[in-house]
Image (tube, rainbow, N blue to C red):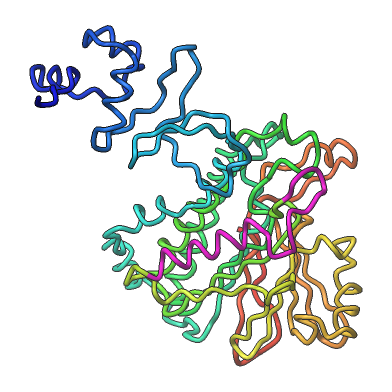
Amino acid sequence: MAKSKCLTCVWEDEHDKKVDNSRTNKAWGRKVGVSEASIRRHKDHSPVIEQVAAFTDDDGDLLASAVDIPMEFVTSRGMSLRDPVTGSWQKMTWHPNRKALHDSLQYDDLKESLEGWKPDPFWALAGDSHDPTHQSERVSVLNMADLQVGKANQRWGGTPETISSVRRSVSRFAEYVVYHSVKTVVLVDNGDPIENVWNTPAQLVTNDLDVPAQIRTFRRLVLETMKTIAPHVDELYYVSIPSNHGQARTGYKSPGGTVDADFGLEISHQLEDATKENPHLQHITYVRPEPLDETAVLEIANTKLAFNHGHQSGGIFKHGQWWKGMDHGRMAGWDADIFVFGHFHTSATYQSGDGRWVVAVASSDPGSDWFTNRTGESSTRGMTAFDLDPLNPGVPQNVRVI
């Protein structure tokens, strides 16, 4: 006796429609006219069925059937998840916050932004208008320090105002680069690219973006800056360093790894992966500290530059003293000509020792009301830029906040 055809299969053939996951098994059973068990057996023996997100089971609980959960986030069985290959169901418990963080560290959005991108013709022609007395060997440095993307509810606003400030500074810097025919630019993430949520409890109520959104926003701002500057220069260096707000943490003041476990450094790696595939951005060189170091070093224009966030020094005018300790310990940057620091959101330039220079850089963030309310002080908002001249090495020139 021939085996009878599945009644659900017959219904699918007659109605030219597939029994998928847009309804529960019980609902499909009522529609097809079979039992819930029949629907389940039909699915178990059918080819892979397209997954549909956000539906509920018979008890009204949300099923995460369309969520691709990496195994490292699974802690125990408990949630209903359908295997897209076998059609069978599993129970597991997972960490949604870790999944969100995992998603935020993907760089698919960067690849989409760079897909088919090439310099704007307007910018390509802009170099025709320049200073005839320009220094062709000049190197310009732009410091994107302490953006703390996500910081909000301050006198100067929040993330939208920070983005506006960043774009204004970058535009002014790009005009300078074009006018002076600068051939080499050093773009620096001086640390604290995001506000994070694990520095103080107050951050939970003063942020306007969660951590994944903070990461994506900063990442796109840097890419936007690269696409603005790169077409006009022969070399573009991107320097990134670890910092306190950028640190991956498991709780307040609780590091989630070594100093290398840092969102700023991770974003740098992602940008490198993405930009190396675009022919117009392959002249970008990425500079990061050696493993377990907090200071990045770059030799350029007959000058050795060192970059450190500055949160270990104890004060903006204590950087030089801290540097002396690095010198005696021969730590990274100990023999630099110019040491560049962030963290204190204030631009200052002064000498240290025998002709060495400390450059503390400004911030584009919306201010810190707690500091202003306590001291009455605030700093000029923007980015600190300066130039290097290979004919006068070791000296920061034309230091300004833009």
Q: Residue furthest front?
A: 1
Give whichever of 261, 156 is nearer the camera.
Answer: 261
Q: Position of residue 86 (x, y in %)?
A: 34, 39
Q: Indicate whether 276 appears above or below 378.
A: below
Q: Quadrant of residue 160?
A: top right
Q: How many marks?
A: 0
User: Is 85 within the magenta?
Assistant: no
Image: magenta residue range: 249-276
Give whichever of 260, 53 is nearer the camera.
Answer: 53
User: Is 268 within the magenta?
Assistant: yes
Q: Indicate whether 329 appears above or below 108.
A: below
Query: In the displayed structure, does residue 52 sit left or right of residue 260?
Result: left
Which residue is painted at 62% across and 64% down in the image? 143
Query: In the displayed structure, does residue 371 sit left or right of residue 3?
Result: right
Which residue is painted at 36% across and 53% down in the image? 113
Q: Position of residue 68 (x, y in %)?
A: 44, 41
Give whichever of 301, 335 is nearer the camera.
Answer: 335
Query: In the displayed structure, does residue 218 sit left or right of residue 114?
Result: right
Q: Quadrant of the N terminus?
A: top left
Q: Position of residue 96 (x, y in %)?
A: 58, 36
Q: Indicate whether 36 appears above or below 176.
A: above
Q: Indicate whether 35 appears above or below 227.
A: above
Q: Quadrant of the C terminus?
A: bottom right
Which residue is painted at 64% across and 53% down in the image? 193
Q: Position of residue 148 (x, y in %)?
A: 66, 48
Give whichever of 284, 251 is nearer the camera.
Answer: 251
